[in-house]
Image (cartoon, rainbow, N blue to C red):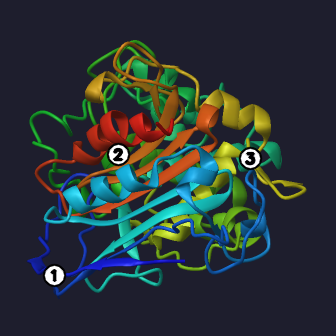
Amino acid sequence: MKKTKFYFAIMSLVCYMAGCVSQPSETVPDREIEIAESNDESEAADHGSVPAGQDDSYVTGEWHVDTPENHGMDGEKLADFIDSIADEPINSMIIVKDGSIIAKYYKGSYDADSIFALNSCTKSITSAVVGIAIDEGFIEGIDVPVSDYFPELEAAADERKKAITFEHILTMTSGFDWPEWTDWNYRFGDWTISDNWVDYVLNREMANTPGEVFNYSTGDTQLVSAIITKATGESERAFAERYLFEPLGITSVRWPEDPQGNSTGGFGIEMSSEDAARFGQLYLNKGKWGEEQIVPEEWVTEATAEHSEGSFYSSKYGYLWWIEPASEDVLYDFYYAMGFGGQYIFVVPELNMVTVFTSSLWNDTGRPYLYFKEDILGMAVVD
């Protein structure tokens, strides 16, 4: 396998904004791109040559690395694309196709062992935990009233609070007044410095009837995490460690909690890029990992289907996943987890592909989304 390395310097930015847990500020001196290239012997990467097609080595060990061309991608164009983003604060990018890593990029001193803040990608991981908790019988279903877990809502002056269901907070249509993307200017206001994050959300006034209006709310996802804790008797992180991370071989997770010990349901999770790719691969596999069904297939299907209008880049919204249907501007259906500052886990079922970005794009969260939609998807067919 041949490797191409490039070197440059950049100072990473530090912020704390909506859904953002920033990377430590550091100067990074170089970057590295790894793309397996074909040679006369058709040798494929560090793990040896395998026939083109699906490789499931990741289930029990490390990812297999293969040439882009063996998986319907143009390696030269892919290398040129990665070179074109060299001066941008994109910290890592991994493309997995047919179960093999076909491109791996790390900026500067970052590498496979680096832990990245995924910010609001946490929401999609929370969605998976909910699906498991329902399947295991801890939560009855998505039609359960939120007041079953927070009985104080029964005494609320606004009758609309009693009508909020679990599905409403999974689709961000709870109706709570939560101006995360407007008046708070992509910040959390004084929420995260309050003594009780859950009470803060529950005490917000209602702006809409539940189920009628999509409104992006990290507050809603904190209610989801608190419900997981109430239903299972353990924090979302502890539950996820046993039922999700350990079966996938994900070992790099860091996950903070609120003052009451609830894991942050909508932001804050950190892990390596390759572990994030494992999570994306699980969803690409319809929740199955080897012979084990980790997340129910029915839940994966429902969670990644449109349930509310959404608003960000015109993407629709499922159960804490963004949904992008094919159109004149989009070559293939895909869905994705998105975190503030340019963190993404893209899943494209038709291409059998997962792509992960981590970034420090604090003023341009959507840039990797555009690169993925306009550049990477366009490389899926080799000229």
Q: Which of 133 and 210 is in front in this view?
A: 133
The picture places residue 362, in percent across and down from the top left corner, at 15, 56
Are discs 2 and 3 less than 8 Å apart at CB?
A: no
Q: How many labels does the image show?
A: 3
Which one is in front, 16 or 12? Answer: 12
The mark that comes first in sequence, 2 or 3, is 2
Amino acid beneath label 1: Ser
Of labels 3 and 1, earlier in sequence is 1
Residue 125: image x %, image y %?
Answer: 55, 53
Q: Quadrant of the N terminus?
A: bottom right
Label of residue 278 in the image: none
Q: Is residue 33 left or right of residue 90?
A: right
The amino acid type found where label 2 is placed reads: Thr
Q: Residue type at mark 3?
A: Gly
The spot of residue 39 in percent (x, y) is 57, 69
Which numbered dot is residue 287?
Answer: 3
Spatial CA distance of label 1 from label 2 is 25 Å
* On screen, residue 363 above or below 352: below
In-image side of 16 versus 53 (left or right): left
Res 25 label: 1
Residues tagged 3 and 1 counted as in contact (Cβ below 8 A): no
Q: Residue drawn 75% across and 63% down?
A: 243
**Which comes sooner in the sequence, label 1 or label 2?**
1
Is residue 158 rendered to the left or right of residue 363? right
Instruction: Tell me where residue 14 appears, x and y as whole percent.
Output: 13, 71
Which structural element holds mark 2? Answer: helix
Say whether residue 267 is visible: no
| Secondary structure under the numbered disc 3 in the rendered image | loop
Q: Residue 218: give its label.
A: 2
* CB within 8 Å, label 1 to label 2: no
Disc 2 crowd, CA 10 A, few/some/many (<14, 14-19, 20+): many
Picture layout, residue 62 above or below residue 144: below
